[in-house]
Structures are given as C-alpha cells and as structure tokens.
Image: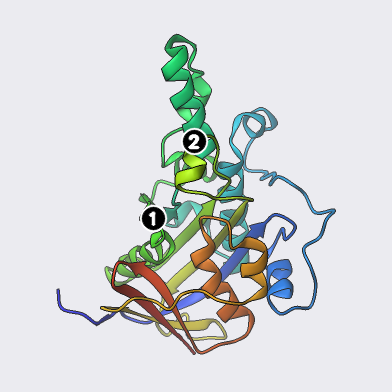
Amino acid sequence: MSLPVTLPPMRLRGIAGWATGMPNWAALRAVARGESAPHEDAPRRPAPDLLAANERRRAPDTVLLALEVAKAACIDANADPASLPSVFASMHGDLTITDYMCQTLATAPREVSPTKFHNSVHNAAAGYWTIGVGCRAAATAISAYEATFAQGLLEAAMQLADGAPQVLLVAYDGPSAGPLASISPSSALFGIALVLALDDAATADSHIRVTATLQPEAAPVQTGGHLLTHLGANAMAPALVLLEALAHSHKVCVLDAGPDLSLRLDFA
C-alpha cells in the first residue's frame, strides 16, 4: 500500500471522556480551554451502571473506565449500543493485574485468583461491554504502544469504509504497577469514547465531519495544552491531541500512528 491514503469521510456523532478529576467530556473540555481546573471532589473511580454491584466490585478500574465512557458516548450519539461494532484500544490493558499475575506465578502459582486471571486478558473491557449491553456485533481489541489511539481510530475508520453504518471507539489506560512501571510508565485514569458514523445524507447534520489520512511521516511531538499538563503521564496521552483540537475547534490535528507514520484528521 502506497501512502498517503485518505479514508472516506466520517461523522463524529458522539463523544465522552473520563479522567481523574474530570469525570465527563464537559469537564475535560473546560480544562482544555483553561476555564476550570480538575475537581478535587470528583469521583476517584468510575461506577458504570451496566454492571451489578458485585460485578463492579470485582471489575478492575480500567474496565469500569471503558464502560463508563462507552455508554456515555452512545447516549451522546443517541445510538443503540447493542447494535454497534466496537474497537477497544488500550496500550496496557491493566498493568496492575499483569503485575499481580507475574508476581503470583513467580512465587505461589497455585494461588492465582480466578477473578484476576479472568480480568487479565486484553479484551476484558470489550467482553464486559458486549455482555453488559447485549451486543452481538464484532468487538476488536487493539494495542500498538504509543500509536494505540491512532491505530484504534484507523481501525474504526476502516470498518466504516467497509460498510459499517456506525462504530464505537473506546480508548483507555490506567496506572502502571510494579517493575513494569519503570519500563512503560503510566499514571491516573483516562479514557475517551467516540461514536463514528458514515458521512452520508442521514448524518450530514450538525455533527463534525472528519477526514482521516494515513501519512508516511512522523507526527509532531506533543507540547503544551492544559490537558497534557494534567494527563500527560497517562499511557493514552496521545489521544489528548484530538481532545485539545475538538475543545478549541481546530481544523486539523495529527496523531502518532507508529514509526514514521501519522494520522491526520481534518475537521469540518
């Protein structure tokens, strides 16, 4: 495949976000614009109502985060979550559980918790989501190091180009733990979700039009921005480029899509 490649235009029909001290997209947007600071009294842990109380207690924070933003984005888009194919993008999945698994297997392998093992797979959040909303559509889990968000967005755009009317993209990461934290550091909780739709007569309304182009050049290094100040240490920080662009009504943003690759997004 020769680059650049421009995918068919799509519409951003729904958006949601959750971060430590910023429990929704409105709060994230206000911080991005310098209109407010993170709220110290905001919830420290998401509590999605898709799960029963017992399940919420057992589920890791990363799963709760993913479900929280996924549902909020579907509500914002007025979309039926049971009908949407989904893409779940996370650099780490849940490194706290990965650290627990590694330590337990090294010291007392017979004591591995079945619940922790159940939650250790990278597609745990996708599984909880599809069960919670009764979705039988395809669900994809993606990890691509610092290019995870851009590759997740690219996957969603390609599914739309292949004929899916709408796609849910959920991107999230939490804190690192144990020795792995020195290799791939991350702190706090941060996640966003987007409902993207085909750009056609049915969606040509007030929703933002997005054109994605995969380019054979490195993305600019992230600098500045209020959200980067608060969330730059989170593994999903590359997604902040998009949120800053949307908060400030920019016409273009460029995401890191891998070594010598970038994903340019043009907004209208």
> Measured from the top left, where is residue 9 in percent x and y?
37, 82
Q: Is residue 102 left or right of residue 224?
A: left
51 or 30: which is nearer to us? 30
The picture quadrant where one finds residue 262 is: bottom left
47 to 36, vertically: above or below: above
Give the residue drawn at x 74%, y 47%.
44
* Residue labelled with disc 2: 179
How far is disc 2 from disc 1 in space, using C-alphas? 18 Å
Answer with mark 2 or mark 1, whichever residue precedes in sequence: 1
**Residue furthest right in the image:** 41
> Measured from the top left, where is residue 65 in percent x and y?
60, 48
The local secondary structure at tag 2 comes to: loop
116 or 87: which is nearer to us? 116
On residue 118, which mark appears? none
**Residue furthest left in the image:** 1
Q: How many marks?
A: 2
Q: How is the image coloured?
A: rainbow
Instruction: Tell me the quadrant of the picture where the N terminus can be found.
Output: bottom left
Q: Residues within 10 Å of mark 1 (few under 14, many from 20)?
A: some
Q: Disc 2 vs disc 1: Cβ atoms closer than 8 Å?
A: no
Badge 1 amino acid: Tyr
Q: Is residue 87 left or right of residue 75?
A: left
> Measured from the top left, where is residue 29 in percent x and y?
68, 73
Residue 117 makes an appearance in the image: no
Q: In this view, does 201 lie to the left or right of 67?
A: left
62 to 52, vertically: above or below: below
> Measured from the top left, where is residue 73 in percent x and y?
58, 62
Residue 167 makes an appearance in the image: yes
On residue 145, which mark appears? 1
Q: Is residue 21 left or right of residue 158?
A: right
Badge 2 amino acid: Pro
Give the residue drawn at x 45%, y 45%.
183
